[in-house]
Amino acid sequence: MQTSSRNDVLLKRSLAAVWHPCTQMKQHETLPLVPIARGEGCWLYDFDGRRYLDAIGSWWVNLFGHGNARINAALTDQLGKLEHVMLAGFTHEPVVALSERLARLTGGALGHCFYGSDGASATEIALKMSFHYWRNSGKPQKTDFVSLAGSYHGETIGALSVTDVPLFRDAYAPLLRVSARVPSPDWRLADPGESPRDFAIRCAGALEQHLERHHAHTAALIVEPLVQGAVGMAMHDAEYLRRARALCDRYGMHLIADEIMVGCGRTGTFFAHEQAGITPDFLCLSKGITGGYLPLSVVMTRDAVYGAFYDDAVTRAFLHSHSYTGNALACRAALATLDIFDEDDVVNTNREKGARISAAARELAAHPRITNFRNTGMIWAFEVTTADPAFGRRLFQAALERELLLRPIGSTVYFMPPYVISDEEIALLAERTLDLIAGMPD
Ligand SMILES: *Cc1c(COP(=O)(O)O)cnc(C)c1O
């Protein structure tokens, strides 16, 4: 790759001083880092003006483009007022307004918002709150959690214990109190001729069998509604969520919806669980909630959960905190993001845009090397037939040469573009991805 000295200097300094996430650093001996000088809309630029279409929303966080004028203006205004104050004993307008607004989006069902900074901390908060709720309710034996095969809920020790991605989990296995795993309703695993819905019903049956035996010790089931992201965009029928909700009610357990990736319009409704017509007991949001600007996460819950902690005894309270809990700038970015949803009628607009993206990808979907082409809302994914174990890395590299930022998971390629992607950018993405796949060695 041709790079100017400014790009080169930044790469060298980065490799010397920065330990990059989710990376075997030695691979950067041959795989160059990508220097980014600025972003605008769906594009990222280096110092030479070389550009990349951000087809994965910068790791699933960006909704309305880089350098969004409306979010920028809100943050500039907030900077003139208050950047941050501790949330224990203090409060401020952005955190109150955001909590009220999020509660309204759940129809008032989840009226209590507890804040963290990252997705993994939201998972930790939901697990701890569920466990502590049962303890406060005279059921301290409910200490276990159930998660789905292929689940991903973050990589801190607690979150990793409900995560089932061996590459991330196995090295730390001795540190984890591993949760029970039930089969994933991922429709790619259905029998030939079995519909996604029938397969979801069969998997809910397996969950029922597990709970029949273990419910007395189980605090909660945690799921990624509709799309399990990190395992490779595994999609399932909403019927699974309806049945899971009914089973959690029947067996006296919480349902934790991890909507860190699927929330904020990504699956075609503002929250993914809406498509099943259910309400979880805990709802975790992060990633897109600030439009991809600032780290923020939130766990929302019901009056009944909040009420179980409300007491004269301090030890019955939820004594969990992070230094940046409810950061004012992050909350303001989230409010600006929700404003855009309202002003631009984003959920409905995305329906039409999603249809245009699917149409543009028709030829790609029909390519003989591609299987399981699938779509939920603003997520598209497919597998590429290949014998190359380094396929993902090679495609990432080849895509950069065609101005595309794609980051396959194994042989699964996916698009999760910012919602502001234009028709021209959609056409460019579909055509160049098709070229790329056709040109990859078997
Ligand atoms: C990304 C993600 C997390 C973890 O969020 P971080 O901010 O990376 O800690 C948890 N659950 C799901 C479903 C995610 O996609």
Image: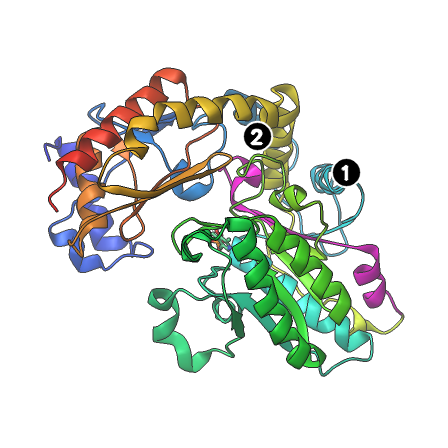
Front one among 208 and 309: 208
Q: Is residue 41 visible?
A: no
Q: How many marks?
A: 2
Position of 144 relative to 222 (above/below): below
SS type, badge 2: helix
SS type, badge 1: helix
Figure quadrant of residue 373: top left
- Farthest front residue in view: 193
Q: Which residue is mark 1?
A: 104
Q: Residues within 10 Å of mark 2 (few under 14, many from 20)?
A: many
The residue under the point 49% across, 38% down is 292
Front one among 242 and 177: 242
The residue under the point 77% across, 55% down is 89
Label number found at residue 180: none
Image x and y of residue 412, in percent:
31, 48
Residue 199 left/right relative to 244: left
Residue 96 left/right relative to 123: right
Residue 21 left/right relative to 68: left
Looking at marks 1 and 2 on the same chain, the residue that comes earlier in the sequence is marked by: 2
Image x and y of residue 247, in percent:
70, 65
Position of 397 relative to 341 (above/below): below
Amino acid type for the residue under numbered disc 2: Leu
Instruction: Kindly report which numbered mark, 1 or 2, lies closer to the viewer in this rendering.
Output: 1
Residue 367 left/right relative to 131: left
Q: Residues within 10 Å of mark 1 (few under 14, many from 20)?
A: few
Which residues are drawn in magenta? 285-311
Label number found at residue 75: 2
Position of 290 relative to 40 (above/below): below
Amino acid type for the residue under numbered disc 1: Arg
Image x and y of residue 342, in percent:
66, 24
The residue under the point 78% across, 80% down is 139
| Quadrant housing the N terminus | top left
